[in-house]
Amino acid sequence: MTRKDRKPGITGSMRWIIFAAALVLLFALAACAKPQEPAPPWKVIDAPTLRAMMASDKGLLVFNTMSEIECLDHRIPGSKCLACEEIENDVTVLPADKDQVMVFYCESEGCYRSCRGAGTAVKAGYKQVHVLDRGMPAWKQAGYAMESIERIPRGSIQSVRATALKQMIAERKDILLVDVRSEKSYKEGHIEGTVNLPLYRLSRSYAEIPLDRTLVLIDDRGFRTFLAGSYLEMKGYRVMRLFGGMEAWQEMQAKKQ
Amino acid sequence: MEEIKGMNIATGRHWSLLFSGALVLLTVFAVICLPVAAPAAQDCRFCHDEPLYRVDFNHSIHAGNGCTSCHVGITDIEKHRDGKEKPAPVNCGSCHEKIAKEYLNNFHYIQEDFRCSDCHRNIHAIRKDGNKNVKLAIIEKCTECHGNADYTTSGHGEAVLKGNQDAAACSDCHGLHDTQVFHTSLEQYPAEARDFYTQKCKRCHADSAMMKRNNLSDKMVAYYEGTYHGKVQELGYPAPVAGCGDCHTRHNILPKEDPRSSIHPDNLEDNCGRCHTGFHARFLSYQAHPDYTDRAKYPALYVTFLFMGGLLIGTLAFFWVHTILWWRKVYWEHDRMEREGIVPPSAVATGEGLEQIERFSVKYRIMHVLLVLSFFTLVLTGFPLKYAGTEWAQAITRLWGGSHMSGLFHRGAAFILIVGMAYVSFESFRFLFPRGEGRKGWLSRLLGPDSLFPNLKDLQDFKAMIRWFFNKGEPPKFDRWTYWEKFDFLAVFWGMFAIGGSGILLWKPEWSSYLVPGWVMNIAALVHSEEALLAALFIFTIHFFNTHFIPNKFPMDRLIFTGTYRLEELKEQRPLEYERLVAEGRLESMKREHPSIPLKLISATFGLGSLLLGMFLTVAILWSILFG
């Protein structure tokens, strides 16, 4: 047997090894990249930036997009109360000058309401729209002061879980379910038998609620009914609230199915 | 008299003049000085004269402070009285700094803007009371709002109400001034919440003194940390696994005898079903934190624990002794040859002795590379779980991209290994029963020199080796496979049966419950873990030594990657095989070209890299066993 007859083992084995290595590499690259979210049409600023802006620009307009009740209870000093529903209903509540520098903030880390407000402003042609990143929680966690115009004494508002509420609805006649979400959310779906009294105009229309029944307040996620309840308790109502809001209710309904 | 009267009048006038002068002076003094001097408490109480401020406050814990210590900003009591000057909001944080700092992250502050006095309502009358049941007071305070039935019926709550000061009140889990909330609608939930609360449970339930006082086991935390749930949780990159609260629920934490308890047998299906779906009822006999050493309660686990422990210690002890004796002999032999100037023939081979003989074909070399890669992937994904509490485990898991990714790689590597083993089984079968020949002569093939099955010669070789170790004879003459190579090969088979079998059961435990009850998963987990330890330590400390670190091959034998070695080495290491090849006239067909430089480089890099990684892991594992 001559050398030529021998198997070309080396090149063959090389190919195999490279193939195996490539296989392993592919395996390692299996982790997929997250798609990037598009940038919002407004500028996002953090709490220290807002504080610096407020100090240097006296004409700056800072809007608290929570309801009037919540805003007067506690807000960033020097800001104005303008619920996002008010802006959506009539954008002329904003100043006429489209170059006015404006900052919107709300009470959730997700900035749902401030973004709604800012979105409406951008759509209406305002050019200098800002949103406070992570909203009031970020402001508070930075250790900055708040301002109270009409502070509501905190009540002892009991909460009921969705399952307990369902039972209560079946058994008790002396309760009145009050949905404090916006008209739009209410229309999209609500618990049967509830009346809608959006939080953003509760301070103007609470007197419509009869005084003879215990109220059960319902909101989106259960964060806002406590203060609304304390407000109504101050006005002489007996109040409870749905723990976890509509989200908890819908979760319960989904589980049953 | 008149005079006197007049004088008196005069003196009286004089006095009144003096008096009014003093009054003017006083007023001037007051106007100048009062803005800096705060009004005294009695000035405030002149108007704020309720008993709360006049009486209760004087007995309160804050009595040492004046009104203006807290109600700052009043510079002029007149203006304040006229409603023109209002005190600034009370800042308790100016004294209670630490609490104020904690409170910045309190959910009640961030979301509902609670201020100190919203909970500490009776702030002017708070007294220091050494005998106060603080836990009870906290529960009473929290349940003013959080009165849902599930808070008050909890096992802990009930115990606190009965006077047990060890039982958790609201604040023991949720914090007092740093209350965090992991609401279902917040994104933090559930990973952060699970981690947060599991740590809270562990803090008390691993406290030996406290558990002893309350007639509870302090080992539960350790047992939980020994399970898959506990380990993934502890790893710090939690994939969704059960923390304490996932099974014991959040508030209604009761012993399993209580029908209201989530872990009562009647409720287990729902309980486990919150995470696991599609399981058979047998699944529920899985033990969430068993004690392997409890013979009476878990006999099967106990026996498995003993068996696996015995197997581990026995196998390692036997081969470690074998390796040490072997190493001693070879080292001393080397030393003798060095002194006497003797060089082994393979080192100075010439002519035909330099020719390369194939030992492993390309197919088997690739299979070994795949085995190495899958094995290391399994070790690097499995052992961080086994030693979840260690820094190195957490670092490696971070490199994989978290427990979830780590688990995917583990299963991927397991799949490659299982396919490889299936192929080797098929080849072994074909070796015994070749196509066309059928069963004829299978026994002689099984026990023949080309087989990897142990035979009588292996026993003789082993005895000869031992004699040689002790300088009592010549080393045995080996054929194609030595007895330790056969053990390596068969150990993988046994390992695959033990690790692979248990691994497949654990792959999808819900489906496995249709085959075996849940408690078998406990055994499978134990077997998987212990057998993996045996396999890793065997490969890293015995296979590595026997094949690579033995002095005449140190630091590595590249044969498995290049596939060929010198004819002279074949003669030296496997004389019987050489003789057989010559006698059967097959030697010529085994000759190959010398391996190329790239192949040698790749072999050395891959081989040494694997050896080093193995050594690192050995140190990490032994360190964790001894000091972890």
Image (tube, coloured by chain):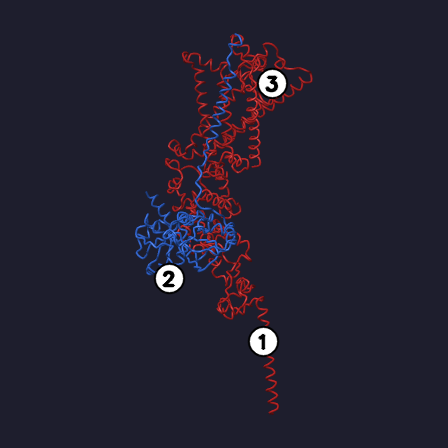
Q: Secondary structure at mark 2?
A: loop
- The image shows residue B442, relative to residue B13, as above or below, that is above
Distance in Å between CA atoms under marks 1 and 3: 121 Å
Using the rendered image of the protein, determine whether residue B531 is visible from the camera's viewpoint: no
Using the rendered image of the protein, determine whether residue B312 is visible from the camera's viewpoint: yes
Q: Colour of chain B?
A: red
| Chain letter for mark 1 | B
Distance in Å between CA atoms under marks 3 and 2: 100 Å
Residue that numbered label 2 is attached to: A236
Residue type indicated by callout 3: Arg
The image's mark for residue B467 is 3
Q: Secondary structure at mark 1?
A: helix
The image's mark for residue B24 is 1
Q: Say which chain is blue.
A: A
Residue type indicated by callout 2: Gly
Asked if badge 3 and badge 2 are on a common chain, one would say no
Q: Position of residue B255 (x, y in %)?
A: 43, 45
Left/right of residue B598 with respect to residue A162 in the rendered view: right
Residue type indicated by callout 1: Val
Q: Position of residue B125 (x, y in %)?
A: 50, 63
Q: Earlier in the sequence, mark 1 or mark 3?
A: 1
Q: Quadrant of residue B341?
A: top right
Name the one closer to the observer, A46 or B354.
A46
3 vs 2, front mark: 2
